[in-house]
Image: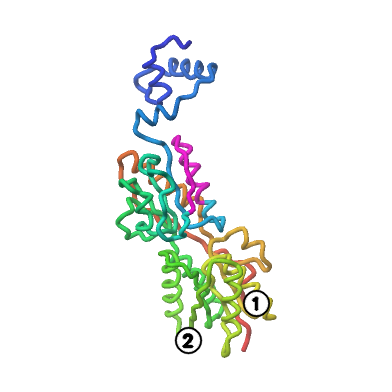
Amino acid sequence: MAGVSQATVSLVLGEKWPGRVSERTAETVRAAARDLGYRPNLAARSLRLGRTRTVLLVVPALTTEFFARVYTGAERVAADHGFGVVLYPSPEGVGPARDPFDSARASLDGVIASSMAADALAAVRGGGLPLVMLDSDPDDAAAAATVNLDIADGVRQAAGHLLTLGHRRVAHLAAAVDSWTFRVRARALAEAMGEVPGATLSTEPAGLSVEEGRRAAERVLARPGPRPTALVCDDDILAAGACKAARRLGLRIPDDVSVTGFDDLALATAVEPELTTVRLPAEAVGAAGMRALMTLLDGETPQDTVLPVDLIPRSSTAPPPRP
């Protein structure tokens, strides 16, 4: 229909025509394809190129919107490159992830994993698939590239905000999850509090749910002795639980106790008062991770990336109550 050879059609539809076929001829071929409703056979193309054009995104769970946002950012970049993304919540959380296919190597071109350890992905990566890690230990040698958030700086911003307001008795509602990102949060908070004379920090572990956050906060706030004037929570879900605990104990937020979260989920503005929290650009993390993987698949070496985060002060924090 276009009046050209099969080879010319292949060059144009494979986007390899620049410098070999004129722009006019390329548009003639594209117009013929549109008129005929022609679509390339992706299965045949994959066999010929040895590529599946499919990427696996592994996350610990789908219990928060953070990972949904990571997927959104990754999928957008993948689509621009003609790739699809399969989202896989690991059945074992941050533990070893099982291969969701008979053979991941035969089904995938690469793997992106968010908030997990590289050694948890041994089964998925069988055969040495390229791996990009998000929100994970940058020193993990198994990852070809990492994309991280400046988690430590986010914690320092939250701690500095509370210390500037005058808080000196702070409790940390720490996620009971053994992962790099939560270890960084605990270490950065301890360091920030340790730099201020007279400041004290206690730690209470909690499962990642509103109910577990409520229970942990109730334990902290009801203990004998001086009560913490601020609760630093490892994510917004725990912070929502902390807010429930304060209300059940007859405490006012922020008059009696201040609360901070982490992530800036939709939940942060759904609670009352609205939550002071650290905003994590989850979509940007997913997009940067996918760009790094595309660079790897092109045979190049991507640079490790660290993305900045921002504290969003809202109504859940204020100066501590007077003695």
> Pointer 1 and pointer 2: residues touching (CB < 8 Å)?
no
Q: Position of residue 241 (x, y in %)?
A: 61, 70
The image quarter containing residue 261 is bottom right
Q: Quarter of the image holding residue 8?
A: top left
Q: Position of residue 26 (x, y in %)?
A: 44, 18
Q: What's drawn in magenta, residue-wise?
A: 70-89
Q: Locate the C terminus by quadrant.
A: bottom right
Query: Mark 2: which amino acid?
Result: Gly
Which circle's residue, 1 or 2, is located before the other in the chain? 2
Quadrant in the rendering for residue 317: bottom right
Q: Residue at x 64, y 80 (%)?
A: 256
Above or below for 273 versus 143: below
Q: Nearer the viewer, residue 44 or 167?
A: 44
Distance CA(mark 1)–CA(mark 2): 25 Å
Residue at 39% from the left image edge and 20% from the top image edge: 10
Q: Name the spot of residue 6 as percent of width and height, x first.
A: 39, 15
Look at the image and say whether residue 309 sits in the magenta stretch. no
| Residue position marked by numbered label 2 in the rendering | 198
Q: Residue at x 45, y 64 (%)?
A: 151
Q: Is residue 122 above or below residue 219?
A: above
Residues packed near mark 2 inside 10 Å, few (<14), some (14 to 19) or many (20 plus): few
In the displayed structure image, the side of residue 49 where residue 87 appears, left or right = right
- Among all residues in the image, which is located at the extreme front? 102
